[in-house]
Structures are given as structure tokens and as C-alpha cells.
Amino acid sequence: MTIRAIGAASTASIMISQEELSVSSEQGSLRVSTLCPNIWRFVMTGRMADKVAIITGGASGIGRACCLRFAEEGAKIVVADINLERASAVADEIASAGGEAIALTVDTSIPEEVAAMASGAVESFGRVDACVAAAGISHAGYVSREATEQAGAD
């Protein structure tokens, strides 16, 4: 199927087949394999190529998801977490998918550990380009009126 779009400034053609999506205009053309399950992910891959990212809380939840996604985009990952065993598992998962990652232990409430984490990242990869602060904990429980008033006073 071919779609031709004509606008005031330019003309573009879009061709869709079982194997390929191609877009052509006066500015150039783009071809993408549709055999890839998600063609948009295919198009975007590599936007963090050779960047170095520290992700705290990287062993689980949002932090883990960030580690995997950044690695998929080409970043070198520092999986930083209070649980070194789980951080190492994420780093191994990234490495087995062809990425590059290290695991470091850090308690982000202790400034000296944060400094050591940053030093470890620079020692391993030479620099840091991005940092995602996804470390955090929560506990289930009831909130009392006194607790909310105290929190507001701080």
C-alpha cells in the first residue's frame, strides 16, 4: 500500500508492505523493517549510545526498568542499589543481552557511599553522562492526623 501526502511545503510518500515501512520526501527517505515486533523501538534504538548512566535503586522496580531501557538504547549502566546481589543480577541481565553494566552497592542516605558510587562509575567508565535517582523505600501503614501535621511542620 502506498500513501501520498501533499502539503503546502512538501510532498511525502509512505509505503507499507509486510516487510518494510518506508517514508520518502524531498528531504530524504527512511526505511524500517516491520519484521521487528515494535518498529518504533527499532527506530529509536541507539539514542544513548556510549553514554554512561548511574541508576540508583537499579535492582528493582522503576530503577530496574530504567537500567534495562537505557542499556537497550546503548548506554553503559551503573546499577547502584543497597542490595548488591540483586544489582548484580540486573547487571548480568544487561550483559547477557549484549550491553555493558556494573553493579555497585550504595545507601543513598549516606553521602560517603554516594561519593564512592560516583567514583566507582568514573573509575569503570571514565565519566558519567546521566543519573536517575530511583532509590527509595516505602512501608504500608496508616497515616495519622498527627503524622501529617508533623510532616507539614518540617
Image (tube, rainbow, N blue to C red):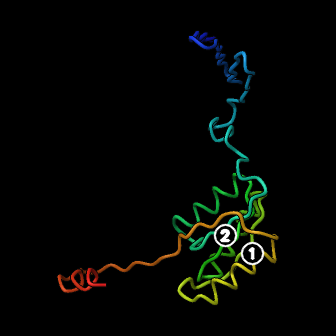
**For the residue carrying disc 2, how many other residues have a C-alpha within 10 Å: few (<14), some (14-19), or many (20+)?**
many
Q: Is residue 74 above or below residue 18?
A: below
Residue 80, relative to residue 11: is it above or below? below
Quadrant containing the N terminus is top right
Residue at 64% from the left image edge and 17% from the top image edge? 14
x, y (%) of residue 66?
Answer: 59, 61
**Closer-to-camera residue (145/42):** 145
| Label at residue 121 | 1
Question: Would you identify the image quadrant in which residue 3 lies?
Answer: top right
Find residue 54 and name its label. 2
Quarter placement of the C terminus: bottom left
Query: Residue 81 appears in which quarter of the rendering?
Result: bottom right
Q: Residue at x 69, y 53 (%)?
A: 72
Q: Say whether residue 38 is left or right of residue 91.
A: left
Q: Residue furthest left?
A: 145
Q: Could you tell me residue 82's position as x and y percent?
A: 59, 83
> In terms of depth relative to the viewer, which is nearer, 44 or 128?
128
Residue 65 appears left or right of 92: left
Residue at horizontal 68 percent and vertical 21 percent from the top: 23
Left or right? Give the position of 71 relative to 7. Answer: right
Q: Look at 67% across and 84% down and name the residue there.
A: 115
Which type of secondary structure does the marked residue at label 2 adopt? strand
Mark 1: amino acid: Ala
Q: In the rendered structure, which amino acid carries the disc numbered 2?
A: Ile
Marks 2 and 1 in Cβ contact (< 8 Å) = yes
Describe residue 118's horizontal placement relative to residue 138 as left or right: right
Mark 1 nearby-residue class (10 Å; few <14, some 14–19, many ≥20):
many
Residue 119 screen position, x and y as percent: 74, 81
Dot 1: element = helix
